[in-house]
Image (cartoon, rainbow, N blue to C red):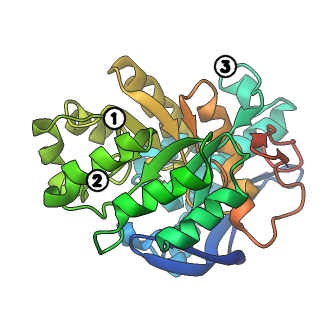
Amino acid sequence: MPVTLEARIERWPIAGSFAIARGAVTEVVTVVVELTDGRNRGRGECRPYSRYGETADGVKIEIEGLGPEIAAGLDRAALQARLPAGAARNALDCAFWDLEAKRAGATVAALAGLPEPAPLITAYTLSLGTPESMRAAAETAAARPLLKVKLGGADDLDPARIAAVRAGAPNAELIVDANEGWTGAALSRNLAACAEARVTLVEQPLPAADDALLANIERPIPVCADESAHDRASLAHLIGRYDAINVKLDKTGGLTEALALASDARDAGLTLMVGCMLASSLAMAPAVLVAQGAAVVDLDGPLLLARDREHGLIYEGSLLRPPSPALWG
C-alpha cells in the first residue's frame, strides 16, 4: 500500500518565557509529520527556525509538496538528495526511520546498527536575563549536574552574568551559549570571564560570518560551533576555528545526516555535543541515538515547556531515559 503523508503545525507554550541573545519567546511552533502505510505509522517533528529563513507555514508547505512523490515510492535514502539540510527534511527523515522500525518490528537503533540507547545526563538551560535573575535561576537549578547558560546580551554584563550564575550554582558544571551574541572586541574579555567561572565549553561566541577570528586567538576554554555547523558540508570550515561541534537534527536535516556528521566530526578530532531546538519529546527522541557517547548532551527542550506530548520522554532530574516505541523509534 502506498505511503501517505500528513503534516500539521503544533504550538507548545513555554513555562514562563525563554530568552536568548536574539530575543524571547513564550511558545514554540513545530511541524509534525506522519507517514502511514495503512498498518504502520511513523512520526517526526521539527522546529522551523527563523535564523535560517524558515517558518512553520513554509516548512509545512515544503513537506506537503512531497506527498505525491512519497506515495510513488520516494524513500528515506532518496530524500537526502531531494531536500536540503533543514527542518523539513528532519521531520520527514525521522518519520521514515520510525515507519521503517514499526514495519520491521525492530528499533531504530537496531536498524541503524547501533547499540540500544542508555540513559543520559542532559544539560538544563538558564535563559538570558539580568545577573540577579540568572543567579536566582541558578540557585533553583543548583542541584543539577550540568547547566547551560545563555549569554550574548547587547550590553557589557555577560562577565557579571556568568559570575552570578557560578555563585548561584557553585558545584554544577557550566557551559555557555552566546548564540552569536559577542563581538570580536568583547571576545577575549568574555572568554576570560567564563574561564574564571570554570565554564567548560562556550558555544558560538561570534556570528557565523565572523568565526574566522577564532583561528587567531588563544582559546582558554573549548569553543563549540553551533550556528556555524549544519551538515557534513560545513565540517571543513570548522577545523582550526572550533574545538567542538553541536549536532542538531533540525540543522543536519534528520537522523541520517546527524549520525554521519557525528562520525566525521569525531574523526576530525572535534568534541561532540548533541543539542536541540526547543520542541516536544518527539523532536528529542531521535537525537538520543546521536547523543550516545557525546561529551555534552543538551536535550532539555521538553523540560522548558508548560506541557509535553503523550508518551513523552522521562526525565528524572537531569537523567534522560531513552524513548519508548510509543513515542518514536
Label 1: which residue? 221
Identify the image quadrant of the C terminus. top right
Mark pair 2, 1: CA separation = 11 Å
What residue is pinned by disc 2? Answer: 190
Q: Secondary structure at mark 1?
A: loop
Tell me the residue that label 3 is attached to.
Answer: 113
Give, as a three-letter code, the residue at label 1: Ile
Q: CA distance from mark 3 to mark 2?
A: 42 Å
The residue nearer to you, when weighing 72 against 296, is 296
Q: Position of residue 130 (x, y in %)?
A: 48, 74
Q: Residue 19: x and y, percent?
A: 51, 73
Q: Is residue 40 left or right of residue 145?
A: right
Q: How many marks?
A: 3
Disc 2 on helix, strand or loop? Answer: helix
The mark closer to the camera, 3 or 1, is 1
For the residue marked with disc 2, what is the amino acid? Asn
